[in-house]
Amino acid sequence: ETGVTQTPRHLVMGMTNKKSLKCEQHLGHNAMYWYKQSAKKPLELMFVYSLEERVENNSVPSRFSPECPNSSHLFLHLHTLQPEDSALYLCASSQVLAGLNEQFFGPGTRLTVL
Amino acid sequence: GQNIDQPTEMTATEGAIVQINCTYQTSGFNGLFWYQQHAGEAPTFLSYNVLDGLEEKGRFSSFLSRSKGYSYLLLKELQMKDSASYLCAVRDPRENYGQNFVFGPGTRLSVLP
């Protein structure tokens, strides 16, 4: 148990659907992250929320919209996605300003866009 | 730009030693991390280097040379369960508290009996 949970674990959606991914961390951390992991490609950092403020978005398409209502919860809202958005979406958390600041990852949501 | 390189795949024998290399070119540096990721699972933290030298942690050791932009992960007494992808990541701090992690493509290690 890593202390970071994600739901759903698997999601299949059409290009016109709207869905949301949820992440919750039980570690008391103050930073949360969304990553995209595609086959044969490095982990891509999409969004960072540090102290509940977004500090990095890496030019992610606007069809991905993050929300961080508090330090324990993170959402990724999806709409009008493309088939190339099919990937594993990983959430992570860490404690910034704490030296090591290693990230703890959730199990991921396997997203398939038809 | 940001660039991290690792070999794509490696194969080793149970009980042997394997070294996985990582080279990086990033605009900033505030630590290098190694993660292990088994197929279908989340990455888990293995080691961290911020100063030059070797950090040892049981069967796993990690080395860093900041001047060369180089790190390696050394796995000793390999076990079948060590078959996984190993991800090298550099923390590139762009703001006082902002955290930007750049990951390499990962090295898929297969341990054979």
Image: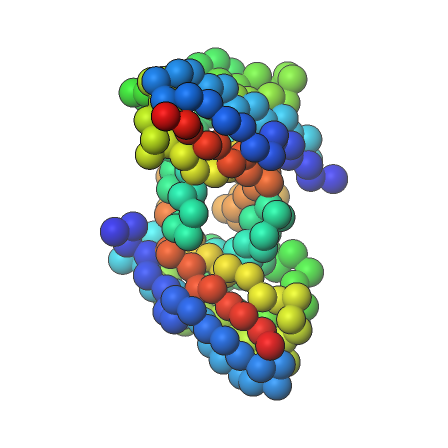
Which quadrant would residue A70 be assigned to in this image? bottom left
Between B44 and A29, the one nearer to me in the picture: B44
Which quadrant would residue B95 be assigned to in this image? top right
Q: State which quarter of the image contains the N terminus of chain B.
A: top right
Rendered position, A52 above or below B106:
below
Identify the residue at image location x=58%, y=66%. A86
- Residue A106 visible somewhere in the drawing: yes
Identify the residue at image location x=52%, y=46%. B99
Q: Position of A76 compared to A95: left or right?
A: right
Rendered position, B11 above or below A56:
above
Q: State which quarter of the image contains the C terminus of chain B.
A: top left
Identify the residue at image location x=60%, y=34%. B8
The x, y position of residue B6, in whole percent, is 60, 31
**Residue that protrudes farthest toward the front in the picture:** B113
Between A100 and B104, the one nearer to me in the picture: B104
The x, y position of residue B91, in whole percent, is 54, 38
**Residue that protrudes farthest toward the top in the picture:** B53
Between A19 and B95, the one nearer to me in the picture: A19
Rendered position, A44 above or below B110:
below
Rendered position, B83 above or below A27:
above
Identify the residue at image location x=55%, y=54%. A37
The x, y position of residue A103, in whole percent, is 41, 45
